[in-house]
Image: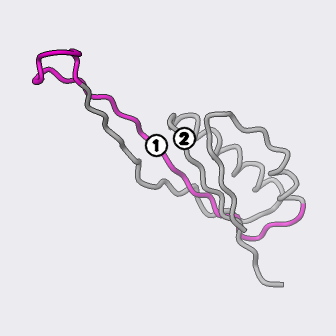
Amino acid sequence: MAHQIIRISLKAYDHSLLDKSTEKIVKTAKSTGAVISGPIPLPTHRTIYTVLRSPFVNKKSREQFQTNIHKRIVDIINSTPKTVESLMKLDLPAGVDIEIKV
């Protein structure tokens, strides 16, 4: 049977929450005997919003807000059914978006 690679993509606004989640995924996958590649940090997507401070006048007075989306990738190379089962039971925080590709 060929090696089946599972790629897990994680996104979050809070980088500390994201790092804890990737650490938890890597720990559970290594405990089942799988080979791990990563976590690989991807570039942070930054979105800046500029708004006027005043609703009527003072066009030069503006305020800027920004959102950062942090991303990580974890590849699981030699996965077993036990690895997949333990990843399904894993409880991760609500602020982390997870995408799994087989």
Give the image location of residue 57, x and y in percent.
13, 16
The answer to whether the residues at label 2 and label 1 have Cβ atoms under 8 Å apart is yes
- Residue 66 is situated, as x and y percent measured from the top left of the image, at 35, 33
Q: Which residues are magenta?
A: 52-81
Where, quadrant-wise, is the C terminus in this rendering? bottom right
Amino acid marked by disc 2? Ala
Amino acid type indicated by mark 1: Ile
Q: Nearer the viewer, residue 65 or 13?
A: 65
Look at mark 2 in the image and give the residue it sits on.
12
Q: Residues within 10 Å of mark 1 (few under 14, many from 20)?
A: some
Left/right of residue 71 with respect to residue 5 in the rendered view: left
Cα gap from disc 2 to disc 1, whole angstroms: 6 Å
Q: Residue at x 67, y 62 (%)?
A: 36
Which mark, residue 60?
Answer: none
Residue 79 sits inside the magenta stretch: yes
Mark 1 element type: strand
Q: Is residue 6 left or right of residue 72?
A: right
Furthest toward the bottom, the residue is: 1
Residue farthest along the front direction in this orientation: 56
85 and 49: which is toward the camera? 49
Q: Which residue is mark 1?
A: 69
